[in-house]
Image (tube, rainbow, N blue to C red):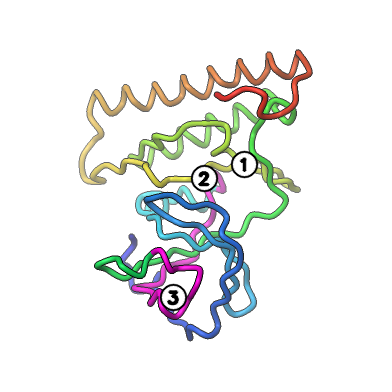
């Protein structure tokens, strides 16, 4: 997590309103939250290189608004009750709230959107990150104008040391992730040609 002082969000706990849980896993939880009247995604992941390399500002991942250090789960019950027995209090990051979104599927698929997803993934790789969860469900179409194609869900992403090059094997994995996108793009295009509804198949 970014430790730059300017990224630390100072706040009164009573001003943070936790809404619905959008997604959860063993690694993280994502909530819709409102802080001082502004809506965000609240996550305990790590923007890391995505933020420091400027990828967030390019719009291919959600914009990063800062972090909250050591939330007290007892203050945010029942939403954070699964953190109550953790040794360390959870940190949180505040990400852009994305409205009017849809996961990439065979109905909304287009060549331009797939190409935008590939360009976005290359930007993620340029920040020395492997996404490691490359599926259509982790690519959001954000209605515009302008329309955006946004990568999400970095729970299992691997971040490399920013002072060193990735190395040959890591570069190969970047190429592998790009090929994965191209391969499910072909499948989505074929399913679209057949007129199948979304989620008929698992990619």
Task: Return the x and y of residue 107 as percentages of the image width and height.
Answer: 74, 28
Residue identifier under label 2: 152
Task: Return the x and y of residue 35 as percentages of the image width and height.
Answer: 57, 76
Judged from the image, the secondary structure of the residue bearing numbered disc 1 is strand
Q: Is residue 12 magenta?
A: no
Whether 164 is drawn above or below 100: the answer is above
The quadrant in which residue 28 appears is: bottom left
Answer whether labels 2 and 1 touch (C-beta < 8 Å). Answer: yes
Residue found farthest to the right: 195
Q: Residues within 10 Å of mark 1 (few under 14, many from 20)?
A: many
Between disc 3 and disc 2, whose residue precedes? 3
Label 2 to label 1, Cα distance in Å?
Answer: 7 Å
Label 1 to label 3, Cα distance in Å?
Answer: 27 Å
Stretch in magenta: 59-82
Q: Is residue 81 magenta?
A: yes
Whether 92 is drawn above or below 186: the answer is below
Whether 59 is drawn above or below 82: the answer is above
Residue identifier under label 3: 9
Name the residue: 40% across, 55% down: 45
Looking at the image, residue 189 sits to the left or right of residue 167; the answer is right
Name the residue: 26% across, 46% down: 162
Residue 13 disc label: none
Residue identifier under label 1: 140
């Amino acid at each position: 997590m970014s430790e730059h002082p300017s990224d630390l969000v100072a706040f009164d706990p009573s001003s943070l309103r936790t809404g619905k849980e959008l997604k959860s896993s063993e690694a993280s939880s994502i909530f819709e939250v409102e802080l001082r009247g502004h809506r965000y995604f609240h996550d305990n992941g790590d923007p890391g290189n995505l933020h420091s390399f400027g990828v967030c500002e390019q719009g291919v991942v959600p914009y990063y608004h800062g972090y909250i250090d050591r939330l007290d789960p007892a203050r945010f019950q029942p939403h954070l009750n699964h953190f109550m027995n953790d040794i360390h209090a959870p940190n949180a990051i505040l990400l852009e709230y994305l409205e009017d979104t849809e996961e990439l599927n065979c109905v909304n698929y287009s060549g331009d959107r797939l190409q935008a997803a590939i360009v976005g993934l290359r930007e993620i790789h340029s920040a020395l990150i492997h996404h490691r969860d490359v599926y259509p469900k982790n690519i959001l179409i954000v209605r515009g104008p302008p329309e955006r194609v946004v990568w999400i869900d970095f729970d299992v992403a691997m971040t490399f040391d920013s002072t060193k090059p990735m190395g040959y094997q890591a570069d190969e994995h970047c190429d592998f992730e790009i090929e994965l996108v191209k391969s499910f793009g072909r499948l989505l295009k074929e399913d679209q040609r057949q007129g199948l509804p979304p989620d008929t198949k698992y990619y």
